[in-house]
């Protein structure tokens, strides 16, 4: 038992070196436009999230293809359809992609307020009395603004590991490293999941830094147990490009200038990440 424990500790110490080694080329990037079809996502006064995400996704894909030779762009959708979440990471897994980028637009929850709206006369016994009347108002607008990027929450690591194990031949940097008959494979898979999280944080940080350079409010890189990230066997991030229920930010996100800036920030983050990984 002691020997097995020592072997396990040794394997855990050695595997990150294999997994985290730089030099892997980034040749395939999946771009996921959030929502679509019957799923509008968040709504503003003049637009729906599903349309803004598609606009930015297509711009980003074109920019990558034009500016990063040798990188293939794969979309989860290019029209107003709704691929299920499982279908989105299936696209990435089957294509053996190196990165998964999901584009979304943020929104805050509506604030509900009960306000006095006058009086009405009601009969109580033989008397008529005035009774206050109230109405409920939903305030959907927000002053919140800025961008944030999400990476996978640790509580969904097991699903990530399942995806890595299922698509092991596409994931592994060395042939045969993820052999299902090898008892050490579970260790390697766990190390890949950990390495992918580290890579995702690095990518998310680079994207957020680019938004910050543009003068956008940087809300940071955060963890969340998102299905679309949990099922993909590669590093991935979900980028919230702004608040659709902030009137000023919605106008910005609907403008050509705004979409170009958003696209540039994400692209530059990807380019910086690619250079870091490949060196």
Image (spheres, rainbow, N blue to C red):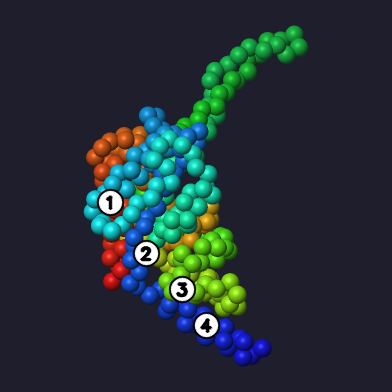
Q: Nearer the viewer, residue 174 or 253?
A: 174
Q: Residues within 10 Å of mark 4 (few under 14, many from 20)?
A: some
Residue 19 x/y as whole percent: 43, 74
Asked if the residue under mark 1 is in contact with the one under mark 2, i.e. CB atoms within 8 Å, the reply is no
State how far apart marks 1 and 3 are (Cα).
Answer: 29 Å
- Badge 3 is on which residue? 175
Q: Is residue 156 above or below residue 21?
A: above
Q: Tell me the quarter of the image containing the C terminus.
A: bottom left
- Badge 1 is on which residue? 65
Of the residues under marks 2 and 1, which one precedes in the sequence? 1
Q: Nearer the viewer, residue 32 or 245?
A: 32
State how far apart marks 4 and 2 are (Cα).
Answer: 25 Å
Residue 34 x/y as whole percent: 44, 44
Whether residue 220 can be seen here: no
Please identify, in this view, whether the residue under mark 2 or under mark 1 is nearer the observer: 1
SS of the residue at dot 1? Answer: helix
Q: Is residue 121 above or below residue 140?
A: above
Please identify, in this view, whether the residue under mark 4 or under mark 3 is nearer the observer: 3
Please identify, in this view, whether the residue under mark 1 or under mark 4 is nearer the observer: 1
Residue 199 x/y as whole percent: 40, 65
- Badge 2 is on which residue? 202
């Amino acid at each position: 038992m002691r020997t097995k424990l020592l072997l396990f500790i040794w394997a855990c110490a050695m595997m990150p070196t294999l997994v985290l080694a730089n030099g892997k080329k980034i040749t395939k990037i999946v771009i996921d436009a959030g929502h679509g079809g019957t799923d509008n996502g968040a709504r503003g006064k003049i637009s729906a999230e599903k349309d803004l995400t598609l606009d930015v996704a297509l711009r980003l894909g074109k920019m990558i293809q034009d500016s990063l030779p040798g990188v293939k762009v794969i979309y989860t959708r290019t029209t107003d359809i709704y691929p299920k979440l499982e279908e989105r990471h299936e696209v990435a897994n089957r294509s053996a992609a190196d990165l998964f980028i999901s584009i979304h637009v943020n929104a805050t929850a509506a604030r509900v307020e009960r306000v006095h709206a006058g009086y009405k006369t009601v009969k109580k016994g033989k008397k008529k009395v005035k009774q206050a009347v109230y109405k409920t108002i939903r305030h959907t607008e927000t002053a919140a603004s800025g961008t944030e990027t999400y990476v996978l929450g640790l509580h969904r690591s097991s699903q990530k590991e399942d995806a890595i194990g299922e698509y092991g031949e596409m994931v592994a940097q060395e042939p045969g490293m993820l052999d299902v008959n090898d008892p050490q494979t579970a260790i390697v898979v766990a190390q890949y999941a950990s390495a992918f999280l580290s890579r995702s944080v690095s990518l998310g940080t680079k994207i957020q830094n680019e938004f910050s350079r543009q003068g956008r409010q940087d809300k940071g890189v955060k963890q969340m147990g998102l299905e679309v990230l949990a099922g993909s066997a590669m590093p991935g991030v979900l980028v919230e490009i702004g608040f659709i229920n902030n009137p000023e930010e919605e106008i910005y996100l609907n403008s050509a200038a705004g979409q170009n800036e958003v696209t540039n920030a994400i692209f530059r983050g990807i380019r910086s990440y690619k250079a870091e990984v490949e060196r």
